[in-house]
Amino acid sequence: MVAHINGELVVWESDRLSFERLQQRAHRRAATAVRAAEQWPAHFVAFDLLRAGADLTSQPYRARRAALEQLFADHRLQAPWTLCPSTTDPKQSTEWLEWSTVGLEGLVFKRLDQRYVPGFRAWRKYRSRHTTEAVIGAVTGAPAAPTTALLGRLDADGRLQYAGRTTVLNLAVRQTLAAELLQGGPAHPWTGWTFSASWGSREQFAVRLVEPVVVAEVAVDVSLDVAGRWRHPVRPRASRSRARAHPAGMPWPPGTCCSTPR
């Protein structure tokens, strides 16, 4: 029987999901691929069953889910095969959001009567976010008209390390920051650093350093790289003078390290 399973590969590192290690494994070849597999073993998380001898895409999700569970039971599939949990209980789904500490980004909602339509996203994703603070160390655009902000947090030695980048700032946030940001001087802790255009990219882009005196309140998800930086752009909510925010409130997350961005 030929089975087509819809799912995702995941890699665990330090008791949480590591997308960066998964990406590194995808680019290994020959002997290095074997060593990487031993060092960072992957698991396949099964979400849906599209074919099991016959095409199931026209079947409702409840039928495909039942067939997927039966496939796991019939073949006694165990690690590295993993059946993604599913529920119709709101209380249970709320409890799953607590798994964000291990890198779970959120929940996916599917209708029980929903068919599988290739190339069309009929499901909905709820991304778990929390609010935190970070120092604005640089911007794209000009300080008087910033487009995005580059954020930093303090390492164990009190040095400002790059932590991530915001989404494109809306007009209200741009106007607020334009009145607060000051051009960075030669003593700026990021002087001489370069920044990539996006996570995992080697392409560099131009930034303007600003004095690290403004604190931004941002909404972030749980996706971190191995250095503890936010992989996805974060959403700014508010800002204020750093003088009114104690630096101890913006430390690097415990258990992570910091490194100079390439």
Image (cartoon, rainbow, N blue to C red):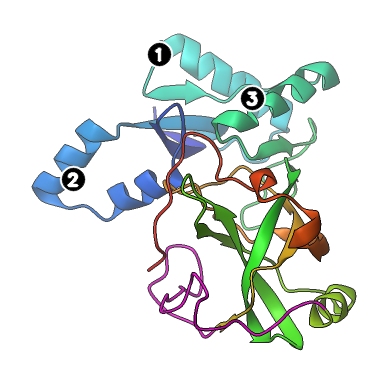
Residue type at numbered disc 2? Ala
Q: Which residue is mark 3?
A: 65
Q: Which residue is mark 2?
A: 33
Q: Is residue 141 above or below residue 170?
A: below
Precedes in sequence: disc 3 or disc 1? 3
Precedes in sequence: disc 2 or disc 1? 2
Determine the secondary structure under disc 1: helix
Q: Position of residue 254 (x, y in %)?
A: 53, 35
Residue 53 visible at all: no
Q: Determine the image quadrant of residue 125.
A: top right
- What stretch of residues is rendered in magenta? 180-206
- Would residue 38 appear left or right of 149 to someone viewing this image? left
Q: Which residue is mark 1?
A: 75
Q: Position of residue 122 (x, y in %)?
A: 75, 49
Determine the secondary structure under disc 3: helix
Q: Is residue 200 magenta?
A: yes
**Quadrant of the snapshot with the N terminus:** top left
Q: Give the number of the disc on residue 215.
A: none
Classify 10 Å Cα crowding around label 1: few (below 14), some (14-19), many (20 and above): few
Residue in the picture at 22% in, 52% down: 28
Precedes in sequence: disc 2 or disc 3? 2
Q: Position of residue 10 (x, y in %)?
A: 44, 37
What's the distance in space between the residues labelled 2 and 3, CA to CA?
A: 33 Å
Q: Is residue 70 above or below residue 10?
A: above
